[in-house]
Image (cartoon, helix red, strand yellow):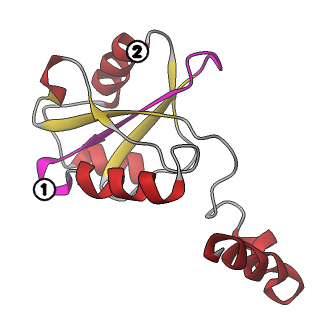
């Protein structure tokens, strides 16, 4: 649903346009990522050895690269991907395109039921681990 909403606001651009752009820059086939943002469209490389992710955003929702770099310094690049603008100026018909490494794992959003199980035991452990 979020993917349809994202492209319904852009009559001059299709999901296929973004997928082809991403396939060119990531060097192989892509698929929509499992979790999508409200203001972006995200794809990931199908082949594990490519490991790339590309995210498309409107200029109004552009990423603050400097802020992300500071988070990366604090939490390491293993946990915080640092995006860079895509080839060709990073723009596709009015969208900003960013490439980043796929940090892997399961998103907190998809794991929320497990994190909250047993009176939030795993969630408390996770928060404690991040605090250390």
Q: Is residue 96 magenta?
A: no
Q: Is residue 92 left or right of residue 79?
A: left
Q: Residues within 10 Å of mark 1 (few under 14, many from 20)?
A: few
- Helix, strand or loop under label 2: helix
> How many callouts does the rendering have?
2
Q: Is 22 situated above or below 103?
A: above
Q: Is residue 9 left or right of residue 110?
A: left
At horizontal 71% and vertical 71% (from top left) the residue drawn is 129
Regarding residue 1, the answer to whether it shows in the image is: no
At horizontal 78% and vertical 77% (from top left) the residue drawn is 125
Report which quarter residue 88 is drawn in: top left
- Span colored in magenta: 46-61
The disc at residue 131 is: none
At horizontal 46% and vertical 43% (from top left) the residue drawn is 81
Front position in the image: 2 or 127: 127
Image coordinates for residue 127, horizontal then vertical, percent: 67, 77
At horizontal 37% and vertical 23% (from top left) the residue drawn is 19
Q: Is residue 56 magenta?
A: yes
The image quadrant where one finds the C terminus is bottom right
Regarding residue 54, the answer to whether it shows in the image is: yes
Q: Is residue 132 left or right of residue 42?
A: right
The residue at which mark 1 appears reads as: 60
Image coordinates for residue 36, horizontal then vertical, percent: 46, 51
Q: Are marks 1 and 2 in contact (CB under 8 Å)?
A: no
Front position in the image: 24 or 99: 99
Q: Is 7 situated above or below 97?
A: below
Front position in the image: 23 or 120: 120
**Sequence-wise first label, 1 or 2:** 2
- Distance in Å between CA atoms under marks 1 and 2: 24 Å
Q: Is residue 109 left or right of residue 66?
A: right
Report which quarter residue 67 is drawn in: bottom left
The residue at which mark 2 appears reads as: 23
């Amino acid at each position: 649903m979020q993917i349809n909403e994202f492209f319904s606001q852009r009559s001059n651009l299709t999901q296929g346009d973004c997928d082809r752009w991403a396939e060119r820059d990531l060097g192989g086939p892509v698929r929509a990522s499992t979790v999508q943002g409200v203001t972006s469209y995200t794809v990931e490389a199908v082949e594990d050895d490519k490991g790339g992710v590309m995210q498309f955003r409107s200029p109004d929702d552009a990423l603050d690269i400097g802020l992300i770099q500071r988070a990366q310094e604090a939490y390491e690049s293993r946990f915080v991907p640092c995006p860079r603008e895509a080839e060709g100026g990073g723009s596709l018909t009015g969208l900003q395109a960013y490439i980043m490494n796929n940090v892997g794992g399961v998103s907190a959003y998809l794991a929320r039921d497990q994190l909250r199980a047993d009176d939030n035991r795993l969630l408390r452990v996770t928060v404690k681990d991040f605090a250390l």
